[in-house]
Amino acid sequence: MTSASTLPDPTLMQSRRDFYERIGHRNLSPLWEVLAALVPPTPKSPAVPACWQYESLRSLVLEAGRLISAEEAERRVLILENPAFRGQSCITQSLYAGLQLIMPGEIAPAHRHTQSALRLVLEGEGAYTAVDGERTTMRRGDFIITPSWTWHDHGHPGSGPVVWLDGLDIPLVRFLDAGFADKGVGRVQAKSRPEGDALARYGANMVPVDYFPGPAEPTRTFVYPYERTRSALVRIAHGKPEPHEGFKLRYVNPATGRAPMPTMGAFAQWLPEGFETRPYRCTDGTVYVCLEGCGEAGVGDGDGTWVFQENDIFVVPSWTPLQVRARRDTLLFSFSDRPIQQALGLWRESRL
Ligand code: GTQ
């Protein structure tokens, strides 16, 4: 018996094409032509690995500061676009990243949106982010979050430019068609709590007695000061590093142990000088930032190696192997959509 799949019959092929054409007019299409691509045996991300050297971005970010004010821009940000997704404002399929600049005296006015945001302060000091009525002063390396639908504005009473990396779940929320946004009535939120209140109330291994957060509720601790992150990593960096990740911790909601926000997870890892990780891959496409030290990142199956130093940013797509070598003691921050994948039972890793 001959089967159509092993013996292409020109008449049959033509009949199929005619059929596809006819059903196409009814907005129908044949699954069997696309099935293998729809359910691939392993993830094949259309995203590509990419690296941005801060040194070469910095002057462009500052140039943007001379071309438009934070107020006019609302948020003065240069978006880091994955080279495979130009024009789509994504660094991975689900995540957005950008470099935001605020100059002394400027204000990025209050707004809120259903997209969740995280910030990693890269340069400068003295600017603040206000989240739901509480300001927090930004210092280099601080990890700050603005969960979904929280009011936030940024300001800078200090001196010198302040630059931070923004990470948002914009592409995910767009995919879900669940985006809402509001502008505040005033440019700046009224201060309803003194600085440090949320960290003391929710981030000191204690919470208010009647506080029982729901499963998807983001943390009320919206700043993770760098000095705490760094000192935790330095203190656990003894003995043999874990072969695939060195000394790595994840940021949590201290009240629940879950990710700080339901859609984005963040991590910090310490790689001692000379240490080289074994190749590792996972299904969450991940954005890395070097906060201290320098090294080399090998991404893909021998596709390329980047030399990275402080404030450089690189993206590793889903299921793409990553191997890092630290030339000096190195601290890497990273973020991804891992909490979504884990909540849905989709997340996988492979230690090569
Ligand atoms: O700081 O609120 O990079 O709303 C993109 C959208 C930053 C922000 C971004 C935003 C913000």
Image: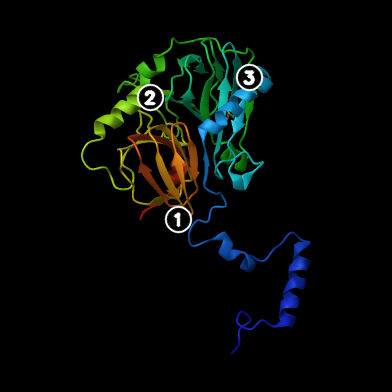
Residue type indicated by callout 2 = Tyr
Numbered badge on residue 302: 1
Residue at mark 2 to residue at mark 1: CA–CA distance:
33 Å
Q: Earlier in the sequence, mark 2 or mark 1?
A: 2
Q: In screen coordinates, is 323 left or right of 275?
A: right
Instruction: Say whether marks 1 and 3 touch (CB < 8 Å).
Output: no
The mark lying in front, picked from 2 and 1, is 1
Name which quarter of the figure residue 325 lies in. Answer: top left
The residue that label 2 is drawn on is 226
Q: In screen coordinates, is 9 left or right of 280?
A: right
Residue type indicated by callout 1 = Gly
Residue 161: percent from left, percent from top: 54, 18
Name the residue at 49% across, 10% down.
Answer: 192
The residue that label 3 is drawn on is 70
Name the residue at 79% across, 62% down.
Answer: 25
Name the residue at 55% across, 28% down.
Answer: 58
Q: Earlier in the sequence, mark 1 or mark 3?
A: 3
